[in-house]
Image (spheres, rainbow, N blue to C red):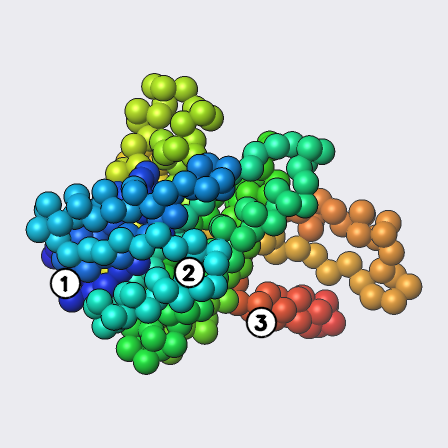
């Protein structure tokens, strides 16, 4: 199998001053990419920090013989994102890869969360992905090349107590990916999601030490390299943890036609609930139109019957 290389490519990794982002940035550089190491350096709750981590990672890359620049912009700030994109284009002349990894936590049970706790998480995780992608989109269209990765979470896919704000943002990123994979297809822009479980500053207080040792962030990065390579898939959610990898998918039951008009009542739906919920035959859809088509076929089949 040929080596995965990124020679001549330029990659931006947000939240790359430590943890997963640092591992992604270092590996991209080892494989030949020019790397923009973005990190504002805030505390895990989003309070102000420094961008020293980004500068340190740049020094690591240069020590390996790689090429990198640091950027301390906030991914939630329009002017900061513009500066990050402008600096990248000025230094390297192109943007091929963006791995949106920046994140913070404001974990509380729903009863204790405030609207502000939702706002800051959505600003960093969701809009902090949207803004860099949007700023680079036309560049990638003109290049006829782009590889974008969102960082989702098991909390977004499956839920986790005390993380309603985080889960809402992380599943929102899957919706973003599912639409951008369609809009980017004709421009050779591929969009994927990584769903990592790793020992980072964001998880160090959530897991026992023995488990943290097994969940090294560098064990996630090889999977991410496959999401940004030349022949990467698109629209894939890659789950990664402790050297194991799997694909997460949104699937739907075959369902059942209940009726229309006076025959369609709440009780009629309840009577067919077991058939509606039968998960012995699951299906996935490439887009919203495919999902609508599923119900059109259901109506047509009912009329034939």
Q: Quadrant of the C terminus?
A: bottom right
Residue 239 appears in view: no
158 in relation to 286, above or below: above
Residue at 10% in and 46% down = 64
Distance Cα–Cα, label 3 vs label 1: 38 Å
Quadrant in the picture for residue 50 = top left
Quadrant in the picture for residue 82 = bottom left
Of residue 190 and residue 122, the one placed in the foreground of this image is 122
**Mark closest to the chain's N terminus, 3 or 1:** 1
Residue at 39% in and 36% down = 197
Residue 17 appears in view: yes
Secondary-structure class at tag 3? helix
* Disc sitting over residue 80 in the figure: 2
Distance Cα–Cα, label 2 vs label 3: 37 Å
**Mark closest to the chain's N terminus, 2 or 1:** 1
Tag in front: 3 or 1: 1
Residue at 47% in and 63% down = 78
Residue 76 percent location from the top left of the image: 48, 56
Q: Quadrant of the N terminus?
A: bottom left
**Mark closest to the chain's N terminus, 2 or 3:** 2
Mark 1 highlights which residue? Answer: 7
Mark 3 highlights which residue? Answer: 289
Secondary-structure class at tag 2? helix
Residue 99 percent location from the top left of the image: 34, 55
41 in relation to 146, above or below: above
Of residue 134 and residue 261, the one placed in the foreground of this image is 134
Tag in front: 2 or 1: 2
Identity of the residue furthest to the right in this view: 262
Residue 290 percent location from the top left of the image: 56, 69
Quadrant in the picture for residue 17 = top left
């Amino acid at each position: 199998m040929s080596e995965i290389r990124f020679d001549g490519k330029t990659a931006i990794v947000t939240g790359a001053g430590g943890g997963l982002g640092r591992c992604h940035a270092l590996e991209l550089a080892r494989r030949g990419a020019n790397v923009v190491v973005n990190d504002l350096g805030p505390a895990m709750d989003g309070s102000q920090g420094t961008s020293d981590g980004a500068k340190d990672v740049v020094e690591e890359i240069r020590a390996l013989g790689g090429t990198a620049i640091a950027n301390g912009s906030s991914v939630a700030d329009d002017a900061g994102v513009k500066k990050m994109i402008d600096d990248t284009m000025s230094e390297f002349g192109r943007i091929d890869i963006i791995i949106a990894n920046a994140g913070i936590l404001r974990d509380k049970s729903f009863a204790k969360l405030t609207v502000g706790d939702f706002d800051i998480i959505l600003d960093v995780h969701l809009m902090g992905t949207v803004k860099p992608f949007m700023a680079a989109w036309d560049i990638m269209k003109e290049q006829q090349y782009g590889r974008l990765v969102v960082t989702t979470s098991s909390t977004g896919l499956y839920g986790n107590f005390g993380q309603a704000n985080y889960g809402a943002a992380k599943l929102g990123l899957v919706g973003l990916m599912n639409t951008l994979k369609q809009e980017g297809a004709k421009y050779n822009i591929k969009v994927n999601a990584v769903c990592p479980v790793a020992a980072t500053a964001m998880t160090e207080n959530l897991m026992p030490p023995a488990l943290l040792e097994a969940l090294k962030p560098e064990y996630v990065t090889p999977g991410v390299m496959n999401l940004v390579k030349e022949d990467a898939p698109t629209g894939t959610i890659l789950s990664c943890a402790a050297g194991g990898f799997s694909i997460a998918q949104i699937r739907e039951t075959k369902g059942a036609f209940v009726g229309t008009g006076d025959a369609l009542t709440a009780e009629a739906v309840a009577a067919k609930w077991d058939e509606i919920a039968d998960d012995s035959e699951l299906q996935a859809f490439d887009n919203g139109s495919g999902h609508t088509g599923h119900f059109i076929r259901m109506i047509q089949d009912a009329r034939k019957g």
